[in-house]
Amino acid sequence: MPHTPATIEESNLSDAIERVSTESERLIIVREGKGVAAIVPLDDLESLEELDEILDQADIPELEVARKEAQEKGTLPLSEFMARLGL
């Protein structure tokens, strides 16, 4: 993911927004060598918010039971799972 410096002049910010909106590029704003914020396409943000809602509504105890079962019984590699489905 491309990185953009934390201090962006107005013209550079405009260019960054253009890249994000037209090329669906995701930019990380870095301060003192660490990512502190991001400029992302609106579709990405909406997807993230939707996922957050889904996770908030998830039945956590049921997920814990499923996770424990997967640890005890093991899991399949995706390729094997897809093969069993004939995909």
Image: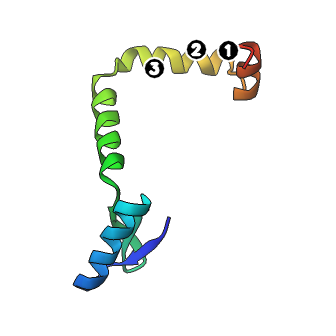
- Local packing at callout 3 (Cα closer than 10 Å; few below 14, some 14-19, many 20+) is few
Name which residue type carries label 1. Lys
Q: Name the residue under label 3.
A: 64
User: In the image, what residue occupies the spot 33% across and 46% down?
Assistant: 43
User: In the image, what residue occupies the spot 61% across and 19% down?
Assistant: 70
Q: In this view, does 70 lie to the left or right of 20?
A: right
Q: Mark 1 points at which residue?
A: 73
Tell me if residue 51 comes above or below residue 20 in the rendering.
above
Cα gap from disc 1 to disc 3, whole angstroms = 14 Å
Q: Name the residue under label 2.
A: 69
Cα gap from disc 1 to disc 2, whole angstroms = 6 Å
The residue lying toward the viewer, choosing from 50 and 63, is 50
Residue 81 spot, x, y in % from top left: 71, 20
- Local packing at callout 2 (Cα closer than 10 Å; few below 14, some 14-19, many 20+) is few
Tell me if residue 23 comes above or below residue 14 in the rendering.
above
Dividing the picture into quadrants, the one containing residue 87 is top right
Name which residue type carries label 2. Glu
> Could you tell me which secondary element the residue under label 1 belongs to?
helix
Q: Of the residues under marks 2 and 3, which one precedes in the sequence?
A: 3
Tell me if residue 23 comes above or below residue 48 in the rendering.
below
Disc 1 + disc 2, Cβ < 8 Å: yes
Name which residue type carries label 3. Glu
The residue lying toward the viewer, choosing from 60 and 1, is 1
Cα gap from disc 2 to disc 3, whole angstroms = 9 Å
- Local packing at callout 1 (Cα closer than 10 Å; few below 14, some 14-19, many 20+) is few
